[in-house]
Amino acid sequence: MAATNPYAPEKPPAVGLARPGVARAVYTALVDLGADPDQLASELGLEAGLFDRGARVPYASLGRLIAHGADRTGCPHLGILVGRRSTLASLGPLGLLMRHSDTVGDALRALEAHAGTQNWGAVVGLAIGSDVAVLSYCPYGPDAEGAPLQSERALATTTAIIRILAGSGSALLEVLLPRSMPRDPAPYRDVFRAPVRFDQEVAALVFPARLLAQRIEGADPAVRRRAEDRIRTLEAGQTSNLTDDLRQYLRAQVTRQRCKAEQVARLRLVSLRTLSRHLKSEGTTFKRLANEAQCQVAKRLLADTRMTMAEVSAILDFSEPAAFSHAFRRWSGMTPSAWRREHQPETSLGQLQA
């Protein structure tokens, strides 16, 4: 019997909601594969009206549905089929803001800054080097089911958006996916038109940094201002607290070894003591949240990729695999190997052991 996890959150994070356009894209993709979306949703006990136009769908429910649909249709790349059907319009006011931004870089920075508007199931990050830019997508909810498919769905959508904004000839350098390679990777190459690397620690698009400076044809400053006003109104109506904000931040930073309380305190322009006091008033601690983020990432890498224990240990900045194994057992009540055996598909385990 697994031990009670002392690092589990005392209350679940705020429920993430996906935009209506995403649910419609799931519906269309499933129908094209010959499946009955309503029947699949019913089999999972999901809420009625899931595919109604205008409905906002729980992010975790959408992940479960995509994973179930991939299994029932025998289509492991269902995520990218959904993603390529999404458009700028499916992003609502954020899509409008991106379409009328001055440059591609401005549009992607808007995506990074406002991805949580009415959709707080994942964190988008934009890292820019001298020659290369990386746009990452990190689900942070407690429900890991369907996380790889959700990630590749988001990357396929973002790829389509970049091509709309920068022109169909804009090329990616590579695509990183935190999942094992499927038997047939050709659909991924067809959608992304770039080398795809599986078994990665994060979902990301890698492209030339010069693309960020490209101006967007037909951008209208007046439309952009109206979209900005609408987003500010929506964000003002959202409720969050320090605990929820840190969950998002830590999920994006955990693989970069930046989960330090001192760094967060500096970012928020408060003392470490003040940060600790605020978290205590919300019933948690920084260490608890950091451990929770590490545990979530470890579980996903173990279940969804063929990374070795040593590789997962290094990604999470442990001194050695034994230290990682000890911490993981403390978090989950199981060893990493036992967790992998219980949660990774048998086909992936066979490939791992071969």
Image: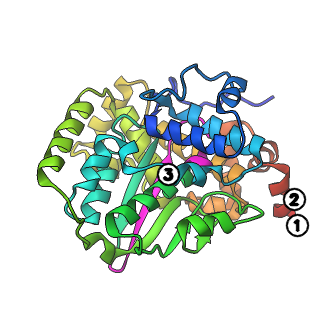
Q: Return the residue at label 3.
A: 154
Q: What residue is at 53 percent from the left and 58 percent from the top?
A: 203
> Whole-percent x and y of residue 5?
64, 31
Q: Earlier in the sequence, mark 2 or mark 3?
A: 3
> Whole-percent x and y of residue 28?
58, 41
Q: Return the residue at label 2.
A: 350
Q: CA distance from mark 1 to mark 2?
A: 6 Å
Location of residue 133 with respect to 156 vertically, above or below: below
Magenta residues, as a range? 130-150
Mark 1–mark 2 CB contact (< 8 Å): yes
- Residue 73: in sight, yes or no? yes
Q: Could you say which quadrant of the image residue 69 lies in?
A: top right
Instruction: Check the picture and name the quadrant holding the C terminus.
Output: bottom right
Residue type highlighted by circle 3: Ala
Q: Nearer the viewer, mark 1 or mark 3?
A: 3
Q: Return the residue at label 1.
A: 354
> Whole-percent x and y of residue 130?
32, 79
Horizontal side of residue 33 vs 267, given as left or right: right
